Image (cartoon, helix red, strand yellow):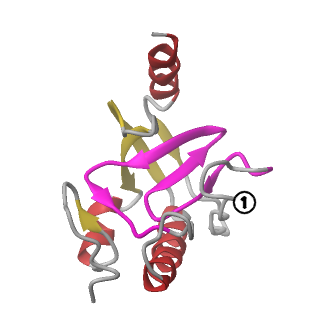
Amino acid sequence: MQRQAVRGAAAAVLLLIHVLPSAAGPILPACESDTRPGRTPSCVSTGDRGWFQGSRWRLKDMEAPEINRRRAMCRAEQIAGIKVRDRLRVLLSRGYTVFPAAKTDPDGWPLVRIQLSDGRDVSSQLMSEDLVQAVPNNTNRWCDR
């Protein structure tokens, strides 16, 4: 019960976060690991997860290739994961708004939708670039190629 309250509080923190790009538009940093931000409170950890001011989030309705070698099923998946993480960092550097989905993934990460400053949905953009796959799915397309 206490864990659900913590998840609900995290989702409330992400209720509606609007981030404007700075004049220079710096690229959002990569997190030190895929499960924690390290010294940077706002960063991108994988192609579908990140942190904003210390609160974690995961993009809903899509799955990115894994970067962590314990979870990735092959080296090609890790390479694809780094590529999509870095693309997400660039997309978010232009400014974005986070909309919570009021749900969490199986690992307890709050699910969100992110709208870029130009109005595009970041998940749709990554799917259109063939970098991620929709969920649910039952294949690992990065290792099956």
When the figure is inspected, residue 48 is found, relative to residue 141, above or below; the finding is above
Left or right: 87, with 128 as reference point: right
The reply to whether residue 110 is visible in this rendering is: yes
Q: Residue 78: within the magenta?
A: no
Q: Locate residue 24: give its quadrant.
A: bottom right
Q: Nearer the viewer, residue 114 or 85?
A: 85
Neighbourhood count class around disc 1 (C-alpha, 10 Å): few under 14, some 14–19, many 20 upward: some
Residue 59 lies, in percent from the top left, at 38, 51
Q: Nearer the viewer, residue 63 or 122?
A: 63
Q: Residue 61: within the magenta?
A: yes
Q: Residue at x 27, y 78 (%)?
A: 141
Q: Nearer the viewer, residue 111 or 105?
A: 105
Q: Residue furthest top?
A: 1
Which quarter of the figure is the C terminus placed in? bottom left
Q: Identify the element where label 1 is drawn.
A: loop
When the figure is inspected, residue 36 is found, relative to residue 65, above or below; the finding is above
Q: Residue at x 35, y 61 (%)?
A: 122
Residue 70 lies, in percent from the top left, at 55, 65
When the figure is inspected, residue 55 is found, relative to residue 10, above or below; the finding is below
Q: Which residues are magenta?
A: 39-66
When the figure is inspected, residue 5 is found, relative to residue 47, above or below; the finding is above
Say which residue label 1 marks: 32
Q: Nearer the viewer, residue 69 or 99?
A: 69
